[in-house]
Image (cartoon, rainbow, N blue to C red):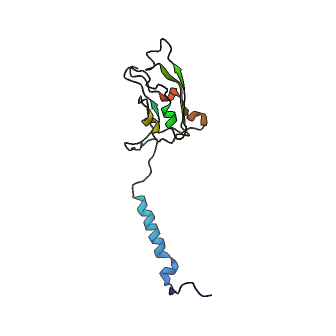
Amino acid sequence: MEPLSNKRKQVDNKPLNFLERSYLPAIVKGLGITISHFFKKPVTIAYPEEKREFSENFRGMHSLKRDENGKERCTACGLCALSCPAEAITMIAAERQPGEENLYREEKYAAVYEINMLRCIFCGLCEEACPKEAIYLDGDIVPSDYLRKDFIYGKDKLVEAPLNQ
């Protein structure tokens, strides 16, 4: 059978000398590369003892902010839930009751505010959509866990502590 192109390559099959047949130079060269790696700085980070530096635009865990008086900023408008492409945010709005003026900023507040961290893609669109600047992605890395239900974060994990504590 004839080849499709007329390009042919000449291959020289010259006999190997004694050192090449024993593979000794190749073994020494491989050992030299291996030994040189012992003296290089390791690339990995020993995580629990050593923390990694993040860039300025790192988006960590969500946090619901309070204003300067310690009141929750969220008014349960739902814009963060609407802007979330992963549909990870759910909320239930409620009316502020008499005597709760020091807890909530507006007459309407989020009685239930949950974020499913398994669905969240940390895009930051909820942060941009919030007109009251109530939600920020400024926390730490989301910690690992074994159960799916532990990744649904409610107001108990999201709302930051009051300033006067």
Q: Nearer the viewer, residue 133 or 38?
A: 133
- Residue visible at 54% across and 84% down? 5
Q: How many marks?
A: 0
- Identified at 51% across, 78% down, the residue is 22
Q: Residue furthest right?
A: 1
* Residue 119, percent from left and from top: 55, 40
Q: Is residue 64 visible?
A: yes
Residue drawn at 54 percent across, 40 percent down? 86
Q: Residue at x 39, y 22 (%)?
A: 163
Position in image of residue 35 (x %, y %): 43, 63
> Which residue reaches farthest top?
98
Q: Where the C terminus falls, by quadrant?
A: top left
Q: Residue 162's x, y, as percent? A: 42, 22
Q: Would residue 137 be seen by someone viewing this image from the given angle?
A: no
In which quadrant is the N terminus drawn?
bottom right
Question: Residue 95, percent across and down?
Answer: 51, 18
| 102 is higher (above) or lower (below) than 10 | above
- Above or below for 8 versus 86: below
The one nearer the camera, 101 or 22, is: 101
Position of residue 13 relative to residue 96, above or below, is below
